[in-house]
Amino acid sequence: MDSTQLLKGVLDTAVLAVLENDDGYGYDIVRRLRDAGFEDIGDATVYGTLRRLFTAGTLTTYVVPSDGGPNRKYYSINSQGKKTLAKQRETWNQFANNMSAVLGTTNKGKK
């Protein structure tokens, strides 16, 4: 199964979760996702997701000056984003339980 297709469906949730406890700038968020196991995630994909989540009102931004280069735009999850993430967690848990049930039933007794 191609995991990139699965990731497209849950990338918003993954980005919100990555920002839940720690604000981050674009490449930092990409790095955190890669460290979490999404090694093939593209920079442009994450940056597009950040813009979309900001436009949707689930993220806020602020700029931090950088000593060694251009200023960095940091993203922060806001109260709407936290509510959205909570709903997405519920949806994910139900979906994962359903898939586990289907996969478990499908594979019972087969070798």
Image (cartoon, rainbow, N blue to C red):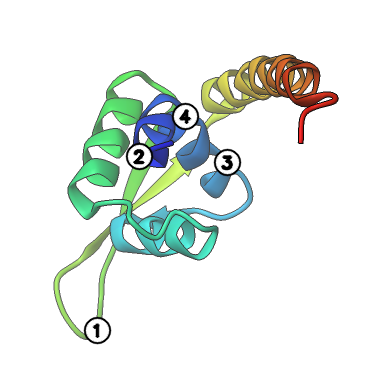
Q: Which residue is drawn at 43% across and 36% down?
A: 1
Q: How far separated are the C-alphas under marks 2 and 4?
A: 10 Å
Q: Are marks 4 and 3 in contact (CB under 8 Å)?
A: no
Which of the two marks, 1 or 4, is nearer to us in this view? Answer: 4
As displayed, is residue 8 above or below residue 15?
Answer: above
Q: Which residue is drawn at 38% across and 21% down?
A: 57
Q: What residue type is labelled 2?
A: Thr
Q: Where is residue 95 in the image (x, y as percent from the top left)?
A: 66, 16
Q: How far separated are the C-alphas under marks 2 and 3?
A: 18 Å
In front of the other: 51 or 108: 108
The tag on residue 67 is 1
**Helix, strand or loop status at disc 4:** helix
Q: Residue at x 43, y 61 (%)?
A: 34
- Residue tagged 3: 17
On screen, residue 97 versus residue 48, left or right, reads right
Q: Do the residues labelled 2 and 4 touch (CB within 8 Å)?
A: no
As displayed, is residue 22 above or below residue 86?
Answer: below
Which of the two marks, 3 or 1, is nearer to us in this view? Answer: 3
As displayed, is residue 23 above or below residue 57?
Answer: below
Q: How far separated are the C-alphas under marks 3 and 1?
A: 28 Å
Q: Where is residue 7 in the image (x, y as percent from the top left)?
A: 42, 36
Q: Do the residues labelled 1 and 4 touch (CB within 8 Å)?
A: no
Which of the two marks, 4 or 3, is nearer to us in this view? Answer: 4
Q: How far separated are the C-alphas under marks 4 and 3?
A: 11 Å
- Residue tagged 2: 4
- Residue tagged 4: 10
In front of the other: 67 or 84: 84
On screen, residue 76 versus residue 95, left or right, reads left
First in sequence: mark 2 vs mark 1: 2
Q: Which amino acid does label 4 sit on?
A: Val
**Helix, strand or loop status at disc 2:** helix
Crowd rating for badge 4 (residues with CA inside 10 Å; few <14, some 14–19, many 20+): few
